[in-house]
Image: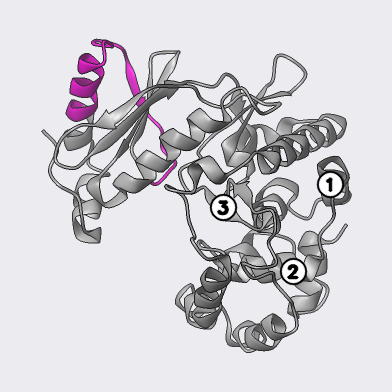
Amino acid sequence: MLPEVNTDEEWDRVVGDETVMRPAAEDLCARLGLAGAPLTRYAEGSQPVYAVGDEHVLKLFPGAAARDGIAEARVLSHVEGRLPVPTPRVHGSGTYESGWRYILMSRLPGADLAVAWPRIPRADRERIVTDAAEALAALHALDPEPLADVLGPDDWGAFLARQRAGAVERQRGCGLAEHWLAQIPGFLDTVPLPDVESVRQPALLHTEFMRQHLTVDPDDGWRLTGLLDFEPAMIGDRAYDFVGVGLFVTRAEPGLMDRFMKAYGRSFDPRQLLAYTLLHVYSNLSWYLRELPAPPEPTLDALAEAWFGR
């Protein structure tokens, strides 16, 4: 029912086409004992994801992303019941057809924190930030070794070297202005980052710890109700996860990064976090500059303090 998707061109043609995806999702739900359940496709996300009734979520992975499907199912099973915030429970996972994989998981209660944020009072925002920080600390405290066969990178130092080698061109491809591009090599030269030998206790990283992947209950005092989307999880330096925290959780709102770090139990140098921002797999500094408050002066040092300072 689904065609193979192994190239970017096939991905663009198939994954967004509901005339192709929906019949397949309905067929798969029937095979999983959920025939006739209403399907609602989520607008966000790189993979096709459907709410199946009120209790389930079906996530599909084409052949080009099959390893991501295997990894996410393993990570979800590894973290289930071990964090202070709920995560989706895996009800089933496996192969479908034409190289596609699926995960059938529980649907987290509550609303998307990113959508709800403007309506949340300051005191409740602060409590959410504290709870989110404690959840991230608990995630980082888990032993990642059982997942080492499905999560990378194998060599953290080599990963950073590759990201650094392509940092300027990657940001240029995103449309970053030349006066910012010119600062990147010198800035990275002055920020020490740990190599594989110095990361003595590598952590299980979410890598996209952001409001969009947290849920809250507006009817229960804006209680944090879930953390989702472990598809891009990695194993490495825990500071790497603070890229998402600064850009998409605290977002330069005064006092929130300080609160997050105190609840997490450790602080990080803002310059180190901006360096990881430039080296992140999904880095797009041009977009971040449009979305977040501008620094007092157009330098990377000022930007680090504005976005990641306490």
Residue wearing tag 1: 256
Question: Could you tell me if residue 294 is visible in this image?
Answer: no
Task: Tell me the residue at 17%/27% (across/down).
Answer: 23
The percent position of residue 299, horizontal first and vertical second, equals 75, 80
Measured in 3D between alpha carbons, the distance from the residue under mark 3 to the one under mark 1, in whole angstroms, is: 26 Å
- Callout 1 environment at 10 Å: few (<14), some (14 to 19), or many (20+)? many
Tell which circle, 3 or 1, labels the residue nearer the N-terminal end. 3
Residue depth check, mark 2 versus mark 3: number of the one nearer the observer: 3
Q: Is residue 39 magenta?
A: yes
Q: Dot 3: within a 10 Å radius of its alpha carbon, few (fewer than 14), some, or many (20 or more) residues?
A: many
What secondary structure is found at the residue carrying circle 1? Answer: helix
Pointer 3: what residue?
235
Look at label 1 and name its amino acid: Leu
- Mark 3–mark 1 CB contact (< 8 Å): no
Report the quarter where the N terminus lies: top left
- Specify which label sits upstream in the sequence, 1 or 2: 1
Q: Amino acid at mark 2?
A: Gln
The residue labelled by disc 2 is: 272
Marks 1/2: CA–CA distance? 18 Å
Q: Which residues are magenta?
A: 23-46
Question: Label 2: few (<14), some or many (≥20) within 10 Å?
Answer: many
Q: Residue at x 65, y 66 (%)?
A: 276
Q: Is residue 97 magenta?
A: no
CA gap, disc 2 and disc 3 = 18 Å
